[in-house]
Structures are given as C-alpha cells and as structure tokens.
C-alpha cells in the first residue's frame, strides 16, 4: 500500500463556491471547455453573472424555456452584442452599488471574428468586466468551420484537404497580442493542463476587472473537431504549452510577463501527433507551422524582456 | 380564438428560472468505458478529480470515485493519473453496464 | 387637477430637444454613436454630462450596434436608458433591436428619420423607420420640436408601464426637425419627475440580478417560443389605448394634447381626408385651411402612432368619408403604394369601397410643398366625386 498523502490537493482550496452546473450536461466527452465552465464559477464565486452567446457553450449556458442547466444569472446574446451587453450590465451594477462579476463567455469565433469590433471597443474603454474566450481554433459548434483563430495548415470543413486544398492557407490572428495592444488592465493566456496558473489568472482577472478591462484567452482543444482521443485532451493542452504553440503569459496594463517558462520547447510535431487536425501536413507544412510558432514566441519574448 | 395553452413562462418574455426547473442529462448513459481504480496505487493526489471535465469525481476521503450517473467515459482521469491507478474498462464487462 | 409649472422657453434644434427630453427623464445609462443628422444629440448629452447637468452613465460606444446592446442590458438589469440614431445606424443595430423587443426591455430611442437603405443618401425620409417596422418596437412620429420633447417623456411613461414593457422609437424628420431651431418649453425637471412618478409605484419589473438563478434570453422551445411571441403581440395591442390615456394625462398636466394615436384636424364634417405624418403635417394644416376657405370640406389626420397601427382610431375617424389621400415619405418594396397607405388599405372591410389614393413625396430632402399637398387635396376631391383617379403617384417623378 503506497503511503497516501491523506491531505487534499491544495488546488481545491481555491474553490470558494459549490458546483453550479447540473451533473449531466450535453458537452462532448473530454471537452476542456466543460472543465473551464465548471471551474470558473467555483473560483470566481457567487455574484458571477455571465453573458453567453451561440457556440459550443450556449446549449448548456443558456436555458431551454424555463429550465436551466446551472444556478447562475445570465443574459443570452447574439454574437455581435456580447461585450456591449456586458458593458451595460457592469455600468449599471456599478452605478447602483450592486456587487457583480460580469463575465463574457465566448468562443474564438465570436471573439476574433464576428464579435471582435465590440470587444475591441469595450477593451479600449476599459469597461469593467472579464471577457473569457475559449479558443478551440474554429467554429466548432456548427461543425468545425475555420475562424481567424485557426492556424495555418489546419484542416476544417471550410478549409478541407483535397486534391488542391491543403488546409487553411493563411496564419491565424495573434489574438492575445492584439488584445495586449489595447493595454487592458489585465489579460492572460491560460489552459486547463496548468490548473493553478489558470486559477490564479481567474482570480487576478476578477480583482483587476474592478479597475478596468480583463481579457482571458483560454486554449481549449476540441476532441471532436481536431480528432483527438478524448482521454488525451489535457495532454494536448500540456504539449501546446511545452512546444510554445500556446505560451502561458499575462500582462497588467500592457506589460507582458511569461508565467510558465518553457526552458527547452519541444518540436511542434510532439503536439501535432496527438491529433488528426494536422495529419495531412508534410515536412513543408509542418515547417511552416513551426515557423509561425517560433515567430510568435519570439515576439512575445521580446516584448516581455523589453519590460516596456 | 379559444386559448387552450397553459403558460410555460410566468414572465412576459423568455426567462429561465433554475429554482423552478433545473435540467439534468443522463450523461452516464453515453459511456462505453468506465474508470476503475486500483486503490492500492492511489495516493489521493486529486488530479483525476481536478481534471475531470464533468467534475463528477466523489471525494471518498482517501481516494476518488467517479459518479457513474454522469461519467462520460472520456478517459482523462486514467490518462492523467501519475500512478496509472485508473484503467478504462469496457462497459460490457459490468453487470450494470 | 394639479398642473406643471411654467417651463423655460429656449430656442433649440430638434436634436438638442432630444437631448433635453432625455435629460429631463434622468436616464441611468446612455449610449450613443454619432450619425448625421443626429450627432448633435450625442454631443449635447456629452456636454450635459461634462457640465454635471446629468449624472447618467454615458458610454461612448464604437458603433450603433453596441449602443443598443449597452442600453438593452442596462434596461434588463433594471435601469432607465436612452439612445439615439438614424438611418444606417438604425439598420446596424437591427439584430439588437430584435433582442430588445424580444426581451421586452423598456428602451426609449430617438430616431432622426433619414433615407435608408440601398442607396447612400444623407437626406430626410422615413425609410429607416419603415425598414425596422417588424422589429417589434412601438414607433411614434412627431411633428415639431416641442412634440419631440413631450413624446420622449410620454415614451418612458409608455415603455416602462408594466402592462406594456416594450421599447419605444420616437421618430422625427432628420434635417427638417433635427437642425431646425424652434421655441421649446423645457419643463421643470421636478414636474417631469412627478409626471413619471406612477411608474415607481408599480411592482418592480422582472430584472437580471447576479446571485439570482434566472436567465434572460433562454432558448424558446416550441410552445415556449410561441407563447412569448403571443404575449408580445398582445402587449402591442394594449399600446394603442395606452397611448391615448397617456396623451390625456400629459395634456392635463403639462397643457399640451396631441390626440394620442392620431390627431384629427377638421375631420368631423369633412368629406375627404388627407393623412400625413411628421413635419409635413404642419404644411398640410396650412393647405387644409386654405382649401376650406375655397369651400372644399377637407380634413387632416396626423398619424402619430405607426406601430402598432392605429386601426380602430382610423376606422372611427374615416367612417363615412368619401375619399382618402395618404402622403408617404417612404416606399414599400413589393407593393406600389406607400407603406402607410398600404397598411390603411388592409381596412377595406371596415371602410368600404372608398377611394384611397397613395402619394409618395418628400424623399431625399425634397420638400413636401404647399402646392404638392394642394394637388393631393384636389385629386382626392375629384375621386370623391366619382371621377377616375391614379391610385399611386410619385409626386417628384411627375414634376
């Protein structure tokens, strides 16, 4: 019998609220967004109120007639209106002195594409709420169509591989960097393989959103769309960090700081081999992807080191 | 017009009300494999419970057990366990499977 | 009955009046994006805020779609809100207009009518209002600057009534009223408070609160959807009588009556009727008087409420009339008649086979002149005598 630690993992101490969701909800088996959605209210506590929008999250975040899948207050929105509704809520609650942590919960489709303009507007105005984008690099809820967050070479239903097609032909928007340029009060990238890093960033986002805009960009691979074995999802997140595909950093007032240092980043193939999203890539395609990863990391490192 | 419909919403527009109706899905029926723990190998590190997307691991004091009503059989717990204490076993091998 | 004190008379533009109207009603949250011919409203409100005249939250949004979303959410959270737009701005917030009425948020918005959409134009016309007529909003049209102010106050009284809970769009002709300075009596703010006070005595409306497990905008599934839609249309029906009630209360207190859903000018003994809306009504009154002196028994109906369509009041006012002319400041895609005329023609069963003549005029800042309206009266008069008539006339195209 191995000696047990007998002490509960200290990460549980970060949870200030009970489970808010029903035991069984219709998110795919192994979906990291389910983990994000369930953990977020546990960390942010009561008086979390969110604005949800169509996408993978909506079928569970929003109710069905009178019924709801969780115990939180929320407002549903079409994708063009999310941060603006959050603005209206946070401005009014602040005005009447009502304690509220307003959270936008959207996918990359909304954040980087159809809902980008109001996100940029709200960030520039430093509206006091948290915008949480779960990035599964595509429009997953409608069946894996490409978004501007889809990386170069990725196979999706609108950038499929065929006789001529080789997957997405241009690079993804560097969304975290774009949001950094707005100099929000706080922003961070995070993923669920690095739980404590994620949780601390949630807490910091809550604190800093009392003063200005907080943006969280969460890496959330889709086991169905990327064709990952559901059991490997957390491992995929971990490898994304270890290959610098998704570096973990944060920035207060536009000053980036890498929070999880990867001393010897692994080659991108360590990441791509865990999924079939990139299985069509030959050496040149893989090299292009590696180049994108390296360039993005170099830019981040330069800014972080510059300390401006 | 003779209205026979009985109002679903107490409100004028479409609002959900969890106190009136909380929904829950029988996701346990999705499973084709279920996690089985070798208690001898378990050191109560809690990673299986923390990484479980439906957060359905029950704290049994010195180990965790999946709530089979909701466990979807994704296998993350088995994959993440540092001690390889969990095995995913096909549902067919269980009497209640 | 108690009446309001005398207000201060200022000579201000229609836009500024819009801002004063909002200011008097003390909104909690204002969000507005500038667009010609409405920009001055946003500027005036920003100035009020900068001078401490209002303490509303003022959100300088990056687009009209955001403006409507901001005020929608603040309204659902329980606040009083205000916004203003025109033309393409109105169309840009179209998805938010739908959510606002669907969520039954009592938003009040001022819309400076301007040509939309299809052809780029920066000129007056009612097309923007027409293009949004199926968004589920209450739409009211005003004639002059004073009416803009008064209608904004009445709009809150209507929107926030628990019996109604619908967003209200107060329309006024861009360019004709937006930039026209007239003498406007600005009431004392305490009197406006008193007028709107009954709203506070209602039980609090459904609102979104953190910590309370209720969600706004749940999916409407099957009968849930149908029911919500049905309730919405029923509320629209209730608007009609409510508009008349509020008009009476407003007149009793502030001394100005507008007639409610429609205003009837010299219609009682009239043989023929002209129907107009907006600033052109002022011109029409002059023509009615002149024609009356010439012996033509003509009357004028000013259409104030457009959505919901004031069918009952119109039927009552038009019963027994021998011919009707409708002046539209917009067009209806798919029907040759102007939109207001087209909707009136739905009432043929109640009105009988009375000639209804459609006139399209006043597009793109081209004036609806005294001779134009004079011609309308003459032609409608001929139709009343049984002479052949043109059922639709684009007045500018015939010049």
Image: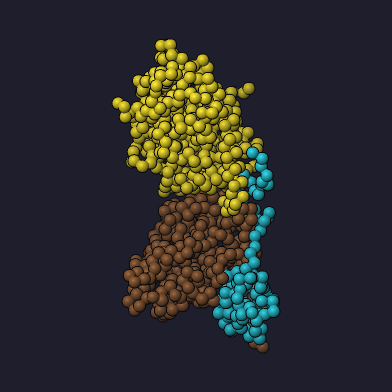
Across and down, in percent, residue A157 comes to 42, 66
Name the side, left or right, on which C231 lies relative to A55: right
- Residue nearest the viewer, comparing A161 with C30: A161
Chain depicted in yellow: C
Query: Which quadrant of the view contains residue C165?
Result: top right
Q: Vertical placement of C25 versus C276: above or below? A: below
Residue for point 48% across, 32% down: C343
Q: Return the x and y of residue C149 as percentages of the image width and height.
A: 49, 30
Image spot of residue A186 (x, y percent): 47, 61
* Location of residue A292 by image quarter: bottom left
Placement of the N terminus of chain C among the 4 image quadrants: top right
The residue at the point 59 percent across, 62 percent down is A41
Q: Which chain is cyan?
A: B
In the image, residue C326 sits, relative to residue A57, either above or below, namely above
Farthest residue, direction left: C399
- The chain coloured brown carries which letter? A
The percent position of residue A54, horizontal first and vertical second, equals 51, 57
Residue A251 visible? no
Please report the residue visible at 61 percent of the width from the left and 80 percent of the height from the top.
Answer: B90
């Amino acid at each position: 019998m191995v000696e047990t630690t007998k002490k509960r993992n200290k990460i549980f101490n970060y949870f200030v609220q009970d489970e808010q969701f029903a035991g069984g909800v219709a998110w795919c088996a192994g979906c990291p967004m389910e983990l994000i959605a369930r953990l977020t209210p546990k960390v942010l506590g009561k008086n979390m109120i969110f604005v949800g929008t169509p996408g993978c999250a909506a079928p569970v975040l929003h109710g069905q007639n009178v019924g709801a899948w969780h115990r939180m207050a929320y407002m549903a929105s079409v994708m063009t209106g999310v941060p603006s509704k959050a603005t209206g809520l946070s401005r009014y609650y602040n005005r009447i002195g009502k304690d509220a942590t307003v959270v936008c919960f959207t996918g990359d489709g909304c954040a980087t594409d159809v809902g980008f303009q109001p996100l940029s507007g709200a960030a520039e105005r430093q509206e006091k709420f948290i915008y949480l984008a779960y990035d599964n690099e595509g429009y997953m809820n409608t069946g894996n169509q490409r978004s501007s967050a889809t990386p170069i070479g990725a196979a999706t239903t609108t950038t499929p591989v065929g006789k001529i097609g080789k997957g997405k032909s241009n690079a993804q928007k560097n969304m975290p960097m774009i949001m950094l340029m707005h100099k929000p009060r706080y922003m961070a990238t995070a993923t669920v393989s690095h739980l404590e890093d994620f949780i601390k960033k949630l807490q910091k986002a809550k604190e800093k959103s009392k003063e200005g805009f907080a943006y969280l960009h969460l890496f959330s691979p889709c086991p169905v769309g990327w064709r990952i074995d559901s059991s490997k999802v957390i491992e995929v997140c971990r490898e994304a960090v270890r290959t610098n595909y998704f570096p973990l950093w944060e920035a207060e007032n536009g000053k980036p700081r890498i929070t999880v240092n990867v001393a010897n980043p692994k080659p991108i193939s360590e990441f791509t081999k865990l999924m079939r999203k990139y299985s069509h890539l030959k050496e040149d395609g893989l090299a292009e992807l590696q180049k994108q990863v390296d360039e993005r990391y170099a830019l981040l490192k330069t800014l972080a080191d510059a300390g401006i | 017009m003779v209205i026979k419909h009985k109002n679903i919403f107490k409100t004028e527009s479409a609002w959900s009300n969890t106190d009136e109706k909380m929904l829950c899905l029988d996701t346990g029926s999705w499973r084709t494999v279920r996690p089985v723990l070798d208690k001898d190998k378990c050191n109560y590190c809690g990673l299986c419970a923390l990484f479980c997307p439906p957060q359905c691991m029950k704290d049994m004091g010195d180990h965790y057990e999946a709530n089979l009503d909701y466990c979807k059989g994704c296998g993350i717990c088995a994959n993440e366990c540092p001690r390889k204490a969990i095995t995913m076993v096909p549902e067919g091998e269980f009497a209640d499977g | 009955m108690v009446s309001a004190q005398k207000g201060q008379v200022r000579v201000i533009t229609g836009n500024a009046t819009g801002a004063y109207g909002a200011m008097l009603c003390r909104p909690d949250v204002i969000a507005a994006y500038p667009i010609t011919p409405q920009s001055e409203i946003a500027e005036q409100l920003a100035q009020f805020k900068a001078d401490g005249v209002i303490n509303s939250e003022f959100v300088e949004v990056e687009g009209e779609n955001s403006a409507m979303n901001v005020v929608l959410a603040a309204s659902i959270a329980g606040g009083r809100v205000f916004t203003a737009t025109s033309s393409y701005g109105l169309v840009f917030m179209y998805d938010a207009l739908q959510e606002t009425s669907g969520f039954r948020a009592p938003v009040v918005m001022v819309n400076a009518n301007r040509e939309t959409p299809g052809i780029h134009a920066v000129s007056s016309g009612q097309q923007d209002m027409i293009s949004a007529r199926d968004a589920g909003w209450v739409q009211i049209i005003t004639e002059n600057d004073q009416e803009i102010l008064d209608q904004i106050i009445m709009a809150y009284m209507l929107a926030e009534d628990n019996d109604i809970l619908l967003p209200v769009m107060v329309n006024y002709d861009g360019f004709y009223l937006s930039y026209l300075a007239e003498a406007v009596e600005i009431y004392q703010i305490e009197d406006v408070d008193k007028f709107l006070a009954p709203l506070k005595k209602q039980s609090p409306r459904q609102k979104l609160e953190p910590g309370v497990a209720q969600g706004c905008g749940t999916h409407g599934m099957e009968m849930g959807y149908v029911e919500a839609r049905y309730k919405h249309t029923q509320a629209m029906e209730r608007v009609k009588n409510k508009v008349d009630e509020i008009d009476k209360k407003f007149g009793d207190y502030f001394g100005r009556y507008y007639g409610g859903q429609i205003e009837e000018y010299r219609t009682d003994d009239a043989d023929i009727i002209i129907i107009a809306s907006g600033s052109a009504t002022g011109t029409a009154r002059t023509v009615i008087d002149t024609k009356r002196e010439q012996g033509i028994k003509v009357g004028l109906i000013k259409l104030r409420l457009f959505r919901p369509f004031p069918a009952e009041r119109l039927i009552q006012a038009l019963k027994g009339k021998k011919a009707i002319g409708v002046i539209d400041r917009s067009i209806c895609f798919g029907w040759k008649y102007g939109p207001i005329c087209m909707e009136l023609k739905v009432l043929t069963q109640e009105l009988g086979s009375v000639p209804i003549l459609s006139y399209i005029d006043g597009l793109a800042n081209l004036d609806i002149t005294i001779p134009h309206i004079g011609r309308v009266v003459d032609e409608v008069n001929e139709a009343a005598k049984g002479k052949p008539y043109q059922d639709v006339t684009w007045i500018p195209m015939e010049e």
